Image (cartoon, grey):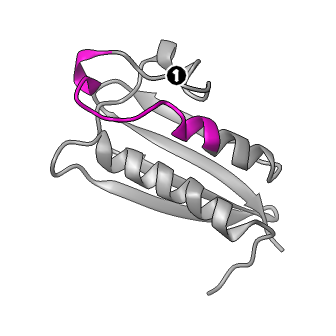
Amino acid sequence: MGVKVCADKDKIGQVLINLISNAVKYSPGNGLVTIDCIIGEGRIKISVTDQGIGISQEDQKKLFDRFYRVQNVKVKTVSGFGIGLYLVSEILRSHDSRVMVESEEGKGSSFSFSLSLE
């Protein structure tokens, strides 16, 4: 079954690439990354969930700020500029959506957003 949304395919593609690559980057070697889609109430909700290192409640508050990077020993060797999630949030804002995060340190993270169905 196909679903049509009203969105910029390149920009939403960037959102998905960023969320999936982050899930892979912050997960242990054999960590499972799951992508889910749920349709309801005229929208589709897309979630990217990992079994990675997780994000503290304090860091979650700043996660979507430009150039913000979590600073702890577990991510010391992970490269990045702290711009990816900021761009995700800006792209989704322009699509009348927002990125949401649920995370627990040591147990992984789930990032989700929704788009209007056409």
Front-lying residue, 51 or 12: 12
Question: In which quarter of the view is residue 78 placed?
Answer: top left
The residue under the point 64% across, 61% down is 12
| Apparent side of residue 104 relative to residue 99 in the rendered image (left or right) | left
Residue 10, by quadrant, is bottom right
| In the depicted structure, whether residue 107 falls above or below residue 51 | above
Residue most extreme to the top: 58
Residue 82 part of the magenta-drawn span: yes
Residue furthest bottom as drawn: 1
State the residue at coordinates (48%, 17%). Answer: 59
Left/right of residue 47 with respect to residue 97 in the rendered view: left
- Give the secondary structure at mark 1: loop
Q: Give the image location of residue 70, x and y in percent.
A: 41, 20
Res. 86 in view: yes
**Residue 36 x/y as whole percent:** 50, 61
In which quarter of the view is residue 106 placed?
A: top left
Q: Is residue 28 above or below residue 64?
A: below
Horizontal arrangement in the rendering, residue 70 relative to residue 27 (left or right) = right
- Residue at 25% from the left image edge and 23% from the top image edge: 76
| Outermost residue toward the front in this view | 81
Quadrant that contains the C terminus? bottom right
Disc 1 crowd rating (10 Å Cα; few below 14, some 14-19, many 20+) is some
Q: Which residues are magenta?
A: 72-87
Give, as a three-letter code, the residue at label 1.
Answer: Tyr
Nearer-the-camera pick, 6 or 39: 6
State which quarter of the image contains the N terminus. bottom right
Q: Which residue corresponds to mark 1?
A: 68
Residue 13, percent across and down? 58, 64
